[in-house]
Image (tube, rainbow, N blue to C red):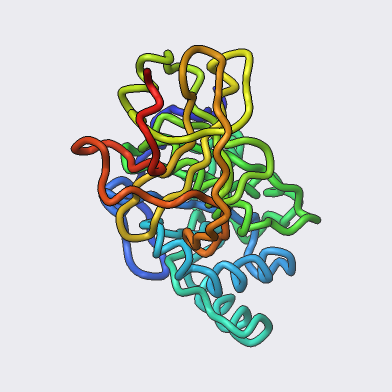
Amino acid sequence: MALQINQEAPDFEADTTEGRIRFHEWIGDSWAVLFSHPKDFTPVCTTELGYMAQIEPDFARRGVKVIGLSVDPLDRHSEWAKDIAETQGTAPNYPIISDADFNVSKLYGMLPAEVEGDPLARTPADNQTVRNVFVIGPDKKVKLILVYPMTTGRNFDEVLRVIDSLQLTANHKVATPAQWQLGQDVIIAGSLSNDQAKEIWPEGPTSGSCPSRAELVARCARTGRTGRVRAVIPRGGAGSLRAASGPAPLTAGGARARMSPWPAASPSPGAPSCWAGSPPWR
């Protein structure tokens, strides 16, 4: 059965360009991105490894470790790194797994169990299904799986965007809509009742109206230092929202958002901070 979201990421031991690792131990309490390649020196993968090296600090700031994988021996990885530095301007600054025995590719469902033999005898087309991105949480569970064809380079800015959403929604009872960017509107989770929403966000002006709690809209941004959430929440009763717009701009993780002022402190210990305003739950 193929690996699926919310399943535990298979653990393994492997040689990498930065030494031998046990995967779960290497992840530790961090998030992780594992992205795979069918062969060394393939041109699309070369651009991907170079671009990932350029933006690796963006992953690190989010507490995310990056690791690559290619179905080739370790000594070829070292030569490939030199080629990446020469052609892309940046050498990989993260480990790359040597999956010459196909073990990891099989564990993660990228190659069939019967594959064996000399990896150097295989062509990129033989390994074309080894073009995945796996995002793995600190709980060692798979949070995202992306699969790309050999002719289409991966969009790692999109991976960062999804990680922002995953980390936000892992810590707060919200969901993110289509095209969401950090600092933009989010949705109060449909799993919350109005009473539960009142507990989490006991105060805060809102705007608009909505027919169901699943569609209650929250304006939300996570600050880089505190990770707190600012939210617009329902006011007055089920399905009703009251208008209150705030023009003050705010920078949150590099994104701009139009938000109302913050209160001096969170309304209750451990609760996300919300906009200042008279108590909405009357």
Q: Nearer the viewer, residue 243 or 115?
A: 243
Q: Residue furthest left?
A: 269
Q: In the rendered image, which quarter is residue 245 located in?
A: top right
Foreground pick, 17 / 115: 17
Viewport quadrant of the C terminus: top left
Give the residue drawn at x 19%, y 38%. Answer: 269
Compared across the picture, whether 132 is left or right of 108 comes to right
Location of residue 262 in the rendering, given as x and y in whole percent from the top left corner = 38, 50
Identified at 50% across, 62% down, the residue is: 251
Q: Residue at x 62, y 82 (%)?
A: 83
Left or right relative to 38: residue 188: left
Q: Is residue 236 above or below residue 276?
A: above
Q: Position of residue 168 (x, y in %)?
A: 43, 42
As rendered, which of 152 and 214 lies closer to the eye? Answer: 214
Task: Please tell me which residue lies in front, 103 or 4.
Answer: 4
Residue 12 relative to residue 96: left or right: left
Residue 89 visible, this angle: yes
Pinpoint residue 199: horizontal percent, then vertical percent. Answer: 31, 23
Above or below residue 9? Residue 73 is below
Q: Considering the image in quadrants, where does the N terminus appear?
A: top right
Q: Position of residue 124 (x, y in %)?
A: 72, 56
Q: What is the count of numbered marks?
A: 0
On screen, residue 260 above or below 281: below
The answer to whether residue 113 shows anywhere in this view is: no
Residue at image coords 56%, 67%: 52
